[in-house]
Image: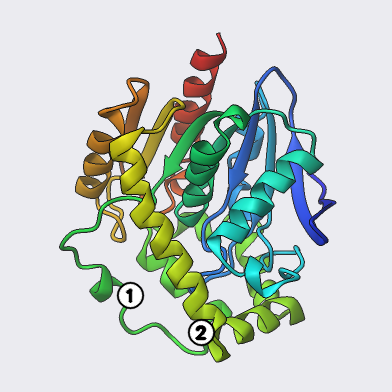
Amino acid sequence: MSDKFVTVSGVKTRYVEEGSGPATLVLIHGGALTDPGYCPSATVWEHNIAGLAQSARVLAYDAPGQGQSEAPKEDADYSYDGLVRHARGFLDATEVKKAHLVGHDEGAMIALRLAFEAPERVASLTIVASPAIAPAGDADINFALMGRPHPIYGAESQRWLLSRTSYTDHHLRAGRWMEEAAETARGETFRAVRAKLTEGKLGAQVRASLAKLKANNYVRFRETGVSVPTLMVWGHQDPLSPVPFAISLFQIVSAKQPLTQIRILNQAGSMPFREQPPAFDAAVGGFVRALET
């Protein structure tokens, strides 16, 4: 795969593309404008794109201010509403009329909001290990991430955090994502975005926008539900959003969407798509192919 770039509302956006077919999958990484402690990008899907592209066109992009994409141009775009607008603009810029959206954590929030706001553009929704969407309960989340090495976003700190949220760290030694993540953290764009989010009011704005959308999700779930077929994929050993939280979300969504499925992948943490690529690709690919038949 080679990097491609497209301009979305003035923001130069990096993406990768592979495959062809009647279906189009768009992969949306997590992290985005929150403080995940690691540098997310389209490369996080590096072990899945080829497998998913065997029967579909697959695109994965860097959110604004992440990876090799430029930072948002306006302060108003430092919000999850802004990220949703960017995602919709990305579909327009890449001429994707209707997509099967696959989102991880906060990326799943972006995909869900597109399904709510523009269902005509969404063929299906896959929510992957998303504490941003799933109901929260009592868990040991805070304990799991205590003692993170400094400097934050240094290569050691990123690897430590990701190994703590994984079943094993084998996926961190494979591929180029971790090398790219360390390089991203040293880059001028990433440092400038983090400074804006930590030194001013924008960080609170981003957190408030995420909380607002999460609260509104439950109004939507109750009143209208999700209008598109929905798949949930979780890691059985996810310390950030344990399986009982995923089951609660499944019960909420399936109440109004009959085409709701859930897959729990064993020996996987908060990034099941990286820890168990063949199983993840089979689950998502099978779900999409069944819908396209």
Tell me how far mark 2 sits from mark 1, CA to CA. Answer: 12 Å
In the displayed image of the protein, which residue is found farthest to the left? 138
Residue drawn 62% across the image and 31% down it: 121
Q: At which x and y percent is residue 281?
A: 51, 32
Q: At which x and y percent is residue 7?
A: 84, 54
Q: Is residue 190 visible?
A: yes
Q: How many marks?
A: 2
Identify the coloring: rainbow
Front-most of residues 183 and 59: 59
Q: At which x and y percent is residue 65?
A: 68, 68
Q: Give the quarter of the figure containing the C terminus.
A: top right
163 on left or right of 28: left
Front-most of residues 179 and 124: 124
**Label 2 neighbour load within 10 Å: few <14, some 14-19, many 20+:** some
Determine which quarter of the picture holds residue 255: top left
Q: Secondary structure at mark 2?
A: loop
- Is 181 rendered above or below residue 82? below
What residue is shown with label 1? 145
Q: Is residue 175 visible?
A: no
Is disc 2 in contact with disc 1, using a CB cutoff of under 8 Å? no
Residue type pointed to by label 1: Leu
- Is 68 rendered above or below residue 148? above
Q: At which x and y percent is residue 38?
A: 53, 70
Residue drawn 44% across the image and 70% down it: 208
Q: Secondary structure at mark 1?
A: loop
What residue is shown with label 2? 152
Residue drawn 73% across the image and 32% down it: 96
Q: Give the quarter of the figure containing the N terminus.
A: top right
The answer to which of marks 2 and 1 sits earlier in the sequence is 1
In the displayed image of the protein, which residue is found farthest to the front? 223
